[in-house]
Image: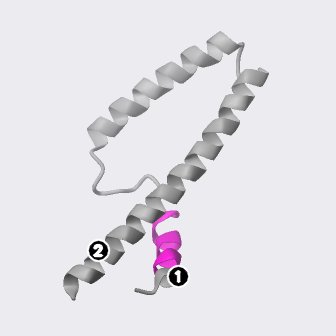
Amino acid sequence: MDIQFMKDYYDLRYEETDGENHFVDETAYQEKQSEQSKMEDQLMEMVGGSESNVWKLYESIMCIYFDMEEIIKQAVYLQGAYDRERMLK
């Protein structure tokens, strides 16, 4: 398997369509998203608003988390491509 080709394909196909996944259970996702939003609102109020140092640190942590999540999504995609290639042999 040409791993670089698959990484390039992933970057082209999946990063540009973030949020569009036909395999996601939309209802479950929306429920979790709503729950997260409510908790973030509570946290923001507790730390003194969006301009507080604590909130800014939280946002920085979440940006790193999302970067890590993207690395994992790409690895899972590449594993699936590898498994498919092995299955077809």
Compared to residue 24, the image places residue 41 above or below, namely above
Is 14 within the magenta?
Answer: yes
Q: Label for residue 55? A: none
**Residue 89 spot, x, y in % from top left:** 21, 89
Q: Can you see residue 51?
A: no
At x 35%, y 56%, the residue is: 21
State the SS at label 1: helix
**Residue 43 spot, x, y in % from top left:** 59, 17
At x 29%, y 74%, the residue is: 83
Q: Residues within 10 Å of mark 1 (few under 14, many from 20)?
A: few
In the picture provided, is 9 more to the left or to the right than 60? left
Numbered range of the magenta stretch: 6-17
Residue type beneath disc 1:
Gln
Residue at the disc numbered 1: 4
Gap in angstroms between the C-alphas marked 2 and 1: 16 Å
At x 58%, y 43%, the residue is: 65
Is 15 within the magenta?
Answer: yes
**Residue 58 spot, x, y in % from top left:** 66, 30
| First reached walking from the N terminus: tag 2 or tag 1 | 1
Q: Quadrant of residue 46?
A: top right
**Residue 3 spot, x, y in % from top left:** 47, 81
Q: Can you see residue 21?
A: yes
Q: Label for residue 83? A: 2
The quadrant the N terminus occupies is bottom left
Q: Quadrant of residue 26?
A: top left
Compared to residue 48, the image places residue 68 above or below, namely below
State the SS at label 2: helix
Compared to residue 79, the image places residue 26 above or below, namely above
Q: Are marks 2 and 1 in contact (CB under 8 Å)?
A: no
In the picture provided, is 21 more to the left or to the right than 17? left
